[in-house]
Image (cartoon, rainbow, N blue to C red):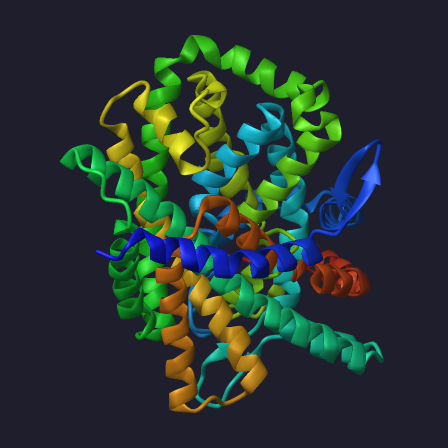
């Protein structure tokens, strides 16, 4: 077991870096006496713009999205590497993670129940943003000579803006986006997920053994890193095979446990929703007022569902289809599943059990664990299993996203360079295990969300193109030109 002083030394070394990165990304503007991150305003404006500009595609495209995901339009001869469902599972494995468990707890502990209201709204409106970026990501994907496919914000920025006579802007934004994706994969995908999952595991092991095992997070982090390493060595095919099984299982597993808590407190559910609504507009002053709660809700929702960040377009680019709009429709389901369903379930558990009023200064996953344990004493153990599954799936998906960005930057990396990248990602998992919560969250947020600035700018510029594509798709769907695939 490593000495606790090593934890302190590494945290002390990382704190200045974390602070500088976080301050740069979350530059604020003062509104009504509250420092509001410009990034939150930028993301909020994007969600609203695309919802109205695309005529509420987040609602009218919902039914068609389910038809596509269940395979009605799957044509095995279409170019691509994965099915619509596999692409959705890979994208969800990156979004349905510890942000749904720990991130929600952070939002409520700071902003109160009202933060839940803004998380839900961000999930609903974020569906339109997610549709836009994935549609473009699929359209501007690159099919390599070996049949592998690369896509994502880097590609629609460089190719799409070049078509509009802005090649230099497109290239600059693409490079910044790729660097952000690499940093985000390490910060959010490796460090934050490792930090919260090993913390929960460490607490449970300590509870079972009756011993203080401080410092064990490093050992747990190393074990998780080894398991992640086994999957990522197998490339995209192994990643999608794991995620298409793991994502549905862990979703049902976690939601079932949350439902037990909610049903146990069913009489408190109406009051919980009252607290959520009232808190959204008349929150307790300690949360920073209405604007403070709004910030927490939007920030945590975006960290969880990624709408506006462009990462999902990397997962959906290899999907087997000749219709980019169809893949965009599949993607709009992600914020709904991630935020409206899973995050809301977590929030209800924390609120109806009263765990958010805990005076023991619990935060992150420890707060969620206390909420689960208040009803069934052994539920924190189930939460530990869920935490590991969520973290594991997010880590392997985040690796894939950051690795695609790495390949965009270096084009054809040597075997040594590629292996070094993979090893550094695994080291980040181990390092994150021993970081303190605030440092882990701040670095994860900043590194992960920096990509929103270039991504949304590119989406605004190419919005008319997406609108025309959507109109054409819907017209062909209505006329019967686009119809379910029937094998002959």
Q: Residue at x 60, y 72 (%)?
A: 179
Q: Nearer the viewer, residue 24 or 10?
A: 10
In this rendered view, identify the residue nearer to me: 36 or 50.
36
**Does residue 466 appear to the left or right of 445 in the view shown?**
right
Name which quarter of the figure residue 77 lies in: bottom left
Residue at the image position 68 percent from the left and 37 percent from the top: 295
Q: Quadrant of the N terminus?
A: bottom left
The reply to whether residue 127 is in sight is yes
**Rendered-image quadrant of the C terminus:** bottom left
In front of the other: 423 or 248:
423
Picture residue at 41% right of the left edge, 69% below the top: 425
Q: Looking at the image, which is closer to me, 155 or 208?
A: 208
Instruction: Give the percent coordinates (x, y) of residue 218.
Output: 30, 56
In the rendering, at what x and y percent does residue 393 appear?
37, 55
Is 183 rendered above or below residue 259? Answer: below
Residue that appears at 85% across and 80% down:
165
Q: Position of residue 343 (x, y in %)?
A: 49, 35
**Residue 211 image point, x, y percent:** 18, 37
Locate residue 432: give its quadrant: bottom left
């Amino acid at each position: 077991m490593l000495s606790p002083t090593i934890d302190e030394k590494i945290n002390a070394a990382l704190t200045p870096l974390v602070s500088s990165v976080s301050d740069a990304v979350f530059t604020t503007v003062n509104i009504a006496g509250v420092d509001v991150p410009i990034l939150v305003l930028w993301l909020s404006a994007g969600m609203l713009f695309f919802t109205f500009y695309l005529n509420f595609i987040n609602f009218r495209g919902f039914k068609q999205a389910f038809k596509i995901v269940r395979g009605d339009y799957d044509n095995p001869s279409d170019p691509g590497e994965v099915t619509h469902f596999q692409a959705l599972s890979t994208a969800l494995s990156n979004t349905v993670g510890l942000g749904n468990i720990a991130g929600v707890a952070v939002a409520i502990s700071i902003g109160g129940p009202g933060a839940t209201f803004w998380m839900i709204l961000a999930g609903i409106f974020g569906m339109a943003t997610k549709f836009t970026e994935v549609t473009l990501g699929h359209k501007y994907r690159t099919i390599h000579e070996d049949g592998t496919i690369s896509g994502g914000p880097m590609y629609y920025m460089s190719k799409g803006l070049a078509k509009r006579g802005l090649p230099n802007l497109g290239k600059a934004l693409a490079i910044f986006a790729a660097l952000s994706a690499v940093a985000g994969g390490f910060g959010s995908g490796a460090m934050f997920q490792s930090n919260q999952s090993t913390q929960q595991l460490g607490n449970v092991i300590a509870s079972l053994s009756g011993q203080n095992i401080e410092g064990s997070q490093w050992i747990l982090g190393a074990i998780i890193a080894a398991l992640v390493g086994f999957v990522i060595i197998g490339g995209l095919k192994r990643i999608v095979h794991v995620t298409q099984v793991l994502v549905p299982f862990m979703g049902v597993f976690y939601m079932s446990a949350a439902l037990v808590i909610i049903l146990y407190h069913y009489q408190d559910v109406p009051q919980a929703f009252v607290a959520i609504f009232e808190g959204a507009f008349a929150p307790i002053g300690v949360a920073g007022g209405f604007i403070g709660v709004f910030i927490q809700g939007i920030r945590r929702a975006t960290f969880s569902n990624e709408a506006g960040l462009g990462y999902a377009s990397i997962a959906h680019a290899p999907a087997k289809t000749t219709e980019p709009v169809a893949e965009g429709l599949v993607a709009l389901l992600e914020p709904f599943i991630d935020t409206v369903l899973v995050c809301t379930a977590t929030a209800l558990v924390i609120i109806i059990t009263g765990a958010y009023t805990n005076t023991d200064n619990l935060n992150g996953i420890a707060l969620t664990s206390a909420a689960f344990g208040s009803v069934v004493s052994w539920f924190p153990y189930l939460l530990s299993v869920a935490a590991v599954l969520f973290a594991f799936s997010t880590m392997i998906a985040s690796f894939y996203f950051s690795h695609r960005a790495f390949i965009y930057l270096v084009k054809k990396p040597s075997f040594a360079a590629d292996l070094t990248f993979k090893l550094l990602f695994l080291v980040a998992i181990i390092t994150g295990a021993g970081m303190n919560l605030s440092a882990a969250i701040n670095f994860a947020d900043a590194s992960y969300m920096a990509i929103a600035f270039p991504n949304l700018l590119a989406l605004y510029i190419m919005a008319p193109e997406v609108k025309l594509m959507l109109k054409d798709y819907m017209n062909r769907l209505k006329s019967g030109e686009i119809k379910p695939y029937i094998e002959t």
